[in-house]
Amino acid sequence: MSAQQDIVVHAARWIGTPYHHRASVLGAGADCLGLICGIWRARYGALPQSVPDYSPSWAESGPDELLWHALIRHFRATDRSEDGQVLLFRLQAHALAKHLGVQCDAGRAFIHACPRAGVVKAPLSDPWARRIVARFAFPPLTTEPED
C-alpha cells in the first residue's frame, strides 16, 4: 500500500466520529485539526509540537496564518493534486485559512470534520475546490522512499 493510500485509510477510520472543537479522539470526538493530528499520531507517534488554543470560528481574521505556518513546518507543501494530501481551505473571504481535510477518491472527495456532521467524506465540489489555498503532503515514514 502506498503512503497516500495509507493516509486515506487512516482518515476513513475517523468517519462517523462526532464533532468536538479541539478534540482528537477516534470515535469520540474531533475537529478538522484533530483529524489531521489523529492521522499524524497513527503514522508517526507523538505530535511534533503542542497544539495552541484556537477559535472555532471560520470567520476569524488577522495578520497571522498560524495554521498555514504550522503546516509548512511539519508537512511538504505541494502544487500537485494527490490523494492523501492535507487540504487547507479559506472558507470566507478575508478570513484566516482554518479548515482542513484529506483528499481521496482521485481528487473527487475529501474527508473532514464539520460542526453538525462530524467526520464525513464529502464531494470535493467546485465550491469546496475554489476555497483550497494550499496542499500539503505528509512527510514520508523512515521506511518510505521519497518521491
Image (cartoon, grey):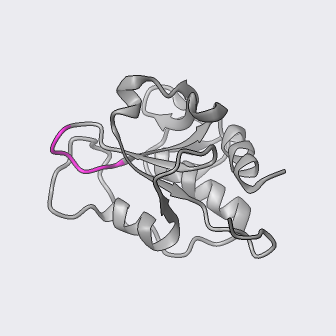
Q: Position of residue 65 (x, y in %)?
A: 27, 61
Relative depth, front residue between 75 and 117: 75
Relative depth, front residue between 73 and 13: 73
Is residue 23 at all visible to an observer of this figure?
A: no
Q: Position of residue 146 (x, y in %)?
A: 70, 70
Q: Quadrant of residue 128?
A: top left
At 20% from the left and 46% from the top, the residue drawn is: 95
Q: Position of residue 33 (x, y in %)?
A: 48, 52
Is residue 53 one of those drawn in magenta? Answer: no
At 62% from the left and 55% from the top, the residue drawn is: 38
Question: Magenta residues, as a range?
Answer: 93-98
The answer to whether residue 104 is above or below residue 54 is above
The answer to whether residue 36 is above or below residue 140 is above
Please state, as top left, top right, bottom left or bottom right, where the C terminus lies in the image: bottom right
The answer to whether residue 38 is above or below residue 117 is below
Main SS, magenta region, reads loop
